[in-house]
């Protein structure tokens, strides 16, 4: 796997775990926490939403779904 792909997957996993821990977060909170652009966070959230791991109950807010996930290290 390319290093850039591995970095992206690690970041998406970290975003998911951050949302799990916090419950509901805003896109801006994610931008500030991870120090990346809003566009990059949006792409990561789109991957998580596509896989039914997060939903947006209202504009700019995100929370996890009930889908069970096995996280590997």
Image (cartoon, grey):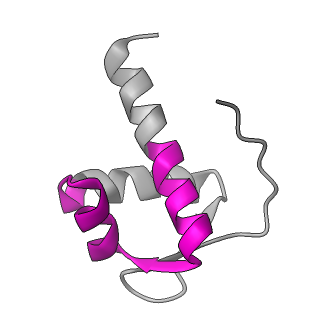
The percent coordinates of residue 49 (x first, y second) are: 55, 60
The percent coordinates of residue 27 (x first, y second) are: 33, 72
Q: Nearer the viewer, residue 73 or 58?
A: 73
Please name the residue shown 70% across and 69% down the image. Answer: 65
The percent coordinates of residue 24 (x first, y second) are: 53, 81
Q: Which residue extends farthest bottom?
A: 58
Please name the residue shown 25% across and 64% down the image. Answer: 31
Across the whole image, how many numbered discs are drawn on residues?
0
Say left or right for 70 vs 61: right
SS majority, magenta: helix
Say left or right for 23 vs 10: right
The percent coordinates of residue 14 (x first, y second) are: 48, 48
> Where on the picture, by quarter, is residue 4?
top left
Q: Nearer the viewer, residue 34 or 66?
A: 34
> Where on the picture, by quarter, is residue 30?
bottom left
- In the image, is residue 18 above or below residue 59? above
Asked if the stretch drawn in magenta spans residue 68, the answer is no
Q: Nearer the viewer, residue 42 or 32?
A: 32
Magenta residues, start to end: 12-39
Please name the residue shown 53% across and 67% down the image. Answer: 19
In the picture, the quarter occupied by the C terminus is top right
- In the image, is residue 38 above or below residue 28? above
- In the image, is residue 41 above or below residue 60? above
């Amino acid at each position: 796997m390319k290093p850039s792909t591995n970095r992206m997957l690690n970041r998406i996993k970290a975003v998911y775990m951050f949302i799990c821990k916090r419950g509901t977060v805003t896109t801006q909170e994610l931008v500030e926490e991870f120090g990346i652009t809003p566009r990059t966070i949006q792409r990561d959230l789109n991957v998580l939403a596509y896989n039914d791991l997060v939903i947006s109950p209202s504009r700019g807010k995100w929370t996890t779904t009930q889908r069970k996930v096995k996280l590997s290290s």
